[in-house]
Each structure stands twice: as structure tokens, then as C-alpha cells.
Image: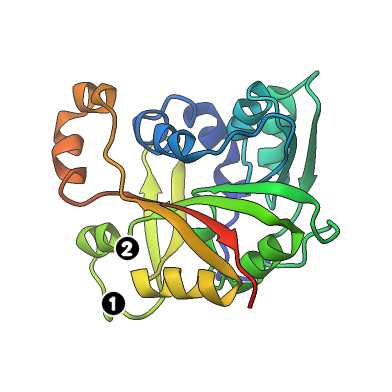
């Protein structure tokens, strides 16, 4: 594993124990993602960066045929426990490398809060395009670049910059801030057209639980949500 790539193996146990009920995830990111999720009943859906299997379980609940991949074997151990007895295909796979699936293997792909851990996500996006059917969709969430600049500063906004941070209930992480133009242009270069983009606000439950954080993120949204579809060049 290259030194510039953060592995969730280092915080897997703490993250898996806390992520289901952590307010930013449970009351902010997850509701916004699910609001943008197309109908999945009977569809083949890839969860790219599936972690402890939360989204895999939600997709199964909605009738999807689910495959989950993650580079962290320790996170996948937690996913196997969460999904025990349920019909999901879970595999260790590094999104920086070619995916172990044939062209057109999936009707949809979700990638929740995963792609910003890669300094270069061009391989992942190109592979997503390859393994999707022509009329498929990609739904992703990532850190909002403007919020990252506000929270961590920048030497030059136009660059992809490494950021060191700590999840207080899990441990230290490293991720990468991209300018908005880079996010949009990288998707286009990989063969995707953005169908919908949201800078969603947290839920009222988040506001009740964390009023100070709510006041901050309605001014500087923490997450960016994008649904995109393949286009023919």
C-alpha cells in the first residue's frame, strides 16, 4: 500500500463500532444519499468502499442484488458480521486498481464517503464507467471542497491537497481535498454526465442533537452529493 493512501485497517474496529449512529453519518450524509438513490429493486448494485456494510444492508432491504468491495480486510470482517445470513457478495478490492468484474456487470454504483481517500481517483472513475451498463448510474458522496478549505485552510485551492484529521470516535485519518472544478471535470473525463448535484443540509434530528454543528454546516456544507450517468463520447 503506497504511503499516500490511507487504509481503514488502522481504525476499522472503532469506525465500525461508531459509524451507524454517528450524527454526521446517520443524520446528515446517509439521509441525503438515500434521498438521491434511484429504485434498486432487482438491480445489480456495487457498493464501492462498502466499509462495515451499512449501505449494503440498506440496499438489500430495498431489494438490490449487492456486491460490496473495500480495500480494508478488517472493515470487510465487520461487513461479513453485519450481513451474516444475507445474500451479498463481499470482496477485498483496491479502487486504485482494475476492478475484478466484467464490463457492464452493474446497473448502479454507490460510493459513500470513499473516493476522497485517494490522491488520484481517475482509475476508480474509469473502472466505474467500465463496469456499469450503458444506462446505469453512479451515486457518490464526498467532502465539500469549500468546507475543507474553511476547516483546514489551503496553500492553493486549485491543487489536490492531503489533509490530516481525526474522527473523534474512531481515530486519525488522511484524505484529499479537490477543487469543485476537478471533481466535475474528472467525472466528465471518465465518461460521466452529472444528472444531479446536491449540497444537502442535515436533518432536523441532527439540528436537535448538534445545534452548533448545524449552524456551521448550513453555512459551510460538509458534504457534496452527485448522481451521474455514463455518456457516449
**For the point 19% across and 36% down, which residue is it?**
214
217 and 76: which is toward the camera: 217
Q: Are marks 2 and 1 in contact (CB under 8 Å)?
A: yes
List the residue tagged with mark 1. Answer: 157
Say which quarter of the image contains residue 183.
bottom left
* Label whose residue precedes the other's in the sequence (2 or 1): 2
Indicate left or right for 202 with 166 as reference: left
| Up-down relation of residue 142 to residue 39 (above or below) | below
Inspect this view and state whether residue 179 appears: no
Number of other residues with Cα within 10 Å of mark 2, as a class: few under 14, some 14 to 19, many 20 or more:
many
Mark on residue 145? 2
| Up-down relation of residue 3 to residue 36 (above or below) | below
Indicate left or right for 228 with 132 as reference: left
Q: Position of residue 213 (x, y in %)?
A: 20, 37
Say which quarter of the image contains residue 134.
bottom right
User: The C terminus appears in which quarter of the rendering?
Assistant: bottom right
Amino acid at each position: 500500500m503506497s504511503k499516500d493512501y490511507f487504509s481503514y485497517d488502522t481504525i476499522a474496529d472503532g469506525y465500525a463500532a461508531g459509524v451507524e449512529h454517528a450524527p454526521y453519518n446517520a443524520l446528515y450524509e446517509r439521509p441525503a444519499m438515500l434521498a438521491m438513490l434511484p429504485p434498486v429493486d432487482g438491480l445489480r448494485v456495487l457498493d464501492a468502499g462498502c466499509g462495515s456494510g451499512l449501505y449494503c444492508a440498506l440496499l438489500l432491504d430495498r431489494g438490490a442484488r449487492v456486491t460490496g468491495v473495500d480495500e480494508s480486510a478488517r472493515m470487510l470482517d465487520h461487513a461479513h458480521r453485519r450481513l451474516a445470513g444475507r445474500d451479498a457478495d463481499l470482496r477485498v478490492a483496491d479502487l486504485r486498481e482494475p476492478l475484478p468484474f466484467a464490463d457492464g456487470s452493474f446497473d448502479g454504483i454507490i460510493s459513500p464517503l470513499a473516493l476522497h481517500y485517494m490522491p488520484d481517483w481517475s482509475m476508480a472513475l474509469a473502472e466505474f464507467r467500465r463496469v456499469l451498463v450503458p444506462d446505469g448510474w453512479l451515486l457518490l458522496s464526498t467532502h465539500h471542497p469549500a468546507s475543507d478549505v474553511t476547516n483546514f485552510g489551503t496553500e492553493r485551492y486549485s491543487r489536490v491537497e492531503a489533509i490530516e484529521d481525526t474522527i473523534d470516535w474512531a481515530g486519525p485519518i488522511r484524505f484529499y481535498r479537490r477543487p469543485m472544478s476537478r471533481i466535475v471535470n474528472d467525472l466528465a473525463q471518465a465518461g460521466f454526465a452529472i444528472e444531479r448535484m446536491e449540497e444537502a443540509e442535515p436533518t432536523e434530528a441532527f439540528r436537535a442533537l448538534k445545534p452548533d454543528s448545524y449552524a456551521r454546516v448550513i453555512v459551510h456544507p460538509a458534504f457534496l452529493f452527485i448522481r451521474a450517468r455514463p455518456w457516449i463520447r
